[in-house]
């Protein structure tokens, strides 16, 4: 990999890792539904400049509903329910575990022995993390945020089967999907008055956080990642994604003083170790990544 591209890959991991801390800041002023509306209304702005990608509307809507709506709504809800940002970064990255598992179940892409070992390690880590729920966050909060990587995994599969597309265009047009359901949910739970009060009373930090999530973490982050994927193999690029939870955990510890007990650390280590095995294991015949 060229040094400039390695630097870009590292920049994306920083952007996405820091986004978990930024999300916690934005949720101080906005509800999860309203934050989702703001994030994807901003990331959809390039539709004014780029043509729709060459995929059908049903697939585009499905990608937007899984990769964006499902992933980020439940991520935001989980963090709002008390799941610390650093821990959330690890849980969301378990999407690789679910991607392999769903590919095996849906398409018969049977994982090899090393991948099975990685699945078991990561799954055991998630169970250990679940066992730490209690005073800081509820088990219900853990289950809610766990929907995020599950939805992320379905989005990965849909993206893979869509073939090569312009990532900037795909991100922009798929970003049109989350705002309307998010707006409907915000209206149902907060009402127009509550939404207006949240928008009017939001801090400058929360507004800057929403801008970061929409324009930097979504538009810029996915555009850079798409460029790298187009240039290099998945095996070359995917390991960089393992750095995202480390960045998220370090940033959360620095900004919010997030602490990790022995069991939680063990669970996080198992998840990340299992994901490393999954991403570096040889690909069996017939198995796609």
Image: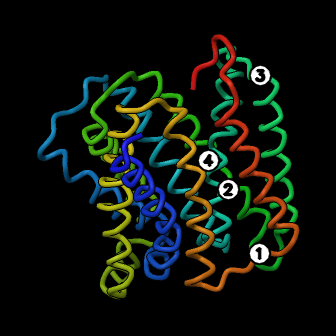
Tell me residue 46's x, y (percent): 19, 49
- Toward the left, the furthest residue is 49
Q: Earlier in the sequence, mark 1 or mark 3?
A: 3
Work out how far the residue at label 1 is from the one at label 2, CA to CA, in angstroms.
14 Å
Which quadrant holds the N terminus? top left
Tell me residue 161's x, y (percent): 46, 21
Within 10 angstroms of label 1, few (less than 14), some, or many (20 or more) residues? some
Work out how far the residue at label 2 is from the one at label 4, CA to CA, in angstroms.
7 Å
Front one among 223 and 81:
223
Residue corresponding to mark 4: 149
Residue corresponding to mark 2: 91
Q: Earlier in the sequence, mark 4 or mark 3?
A: 3
Within 10 angstroms of label 4, few (less than 14), some, or many (20 or more) residues? many
Work out how far the residue at label 3 is from the one at label 2, CA to CA, in angstroms.
23 Å
Q: Are marks 2 and 4 in contact (CB under 8 Å)?
A: yes
Within 10 angstroms of label 3, few (less than 14), some, or many (20 or more) residues? some
Tell me residue 102's x, y (percent): 67, 28
Front one among 221 and 129:
221
Which quadrant holds the C terminus? top right
Residue at image position (73%, 80%) is 259
Work out how far the residue at label 4 is from the one at label 3, CA to CA, in angstroms.
22 Å
- Toward the front, the furthest residue is 3
Residue corresponding to mark 3: 112
Residue corresponding to mark 1: 260
What is the quadrant of residue 11 in the picture? bottom left
Work out how far the residue at label 1 is from the one at label 3, CA to CA, in angstroms.
32 Å
Looking at the picture, does residue 205 appear above or below residue 185?
below
Work out how far the residue at label 4 is from the one at label 1, CA to CA, in angstroms.
21 Å
């Amino acid at each position: 990999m060229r040094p400039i591209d390695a630097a870009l890959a590292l920049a994306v991991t920083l952007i996405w890792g820091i986004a978990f801390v930024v999300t916690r800041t934005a949720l101080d002023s906005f509800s999860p539904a309203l934050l989702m509306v703001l994030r994807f209304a901003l990331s959809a702005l390039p539709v004014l400049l780029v043509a729709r990608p060459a995929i059908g509307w049903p697939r585009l809507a499905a990608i937007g509903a899984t990769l964006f709506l499902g992933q980020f709504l439940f991520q935001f809800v989980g963090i709002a329910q008390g799941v610390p940002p650093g821990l959330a970064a690890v849980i969301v990255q378990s999407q690789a575990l679910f991607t392999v598992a769903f590919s095996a179940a849906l398409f018969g892409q049977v994982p090899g022995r090393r991948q099975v070992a990685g699945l078991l390690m990561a799954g055991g880590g998630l169970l250990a993390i679940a066992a730490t729920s209690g005073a800081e966050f509820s088990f219900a909060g853990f289950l809610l945020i766990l929907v995020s990587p599950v939805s992320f995994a379905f989005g990965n599969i849909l993206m893979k089967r869509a073939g090569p597309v312009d990532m900037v265009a795909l991100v922009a047009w798929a970003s049109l999907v989350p705002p309307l359901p998010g707006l409907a949910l915000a209206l149902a739970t907060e009402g127009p008055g509550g939404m207006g009060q949240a928008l009017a009373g939001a801090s400058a930090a929360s507004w800057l956080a929403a801008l970061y999530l929409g324009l930097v973490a979504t538009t810029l982050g996915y555009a850079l990642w798409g460029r790298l994927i187009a240039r290099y193999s998945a095996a070359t690029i995917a390991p960089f994604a393992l750095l995202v939870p480390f960045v998220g955990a370090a940033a959360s510890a620095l900004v919010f003083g997030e602490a990790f007990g022995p069991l939680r650390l063990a669970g996080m280590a198992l998840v990340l170790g299992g994901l490393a095995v999954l991403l570096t294991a040889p690909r069996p015949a017939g198995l796609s990544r």
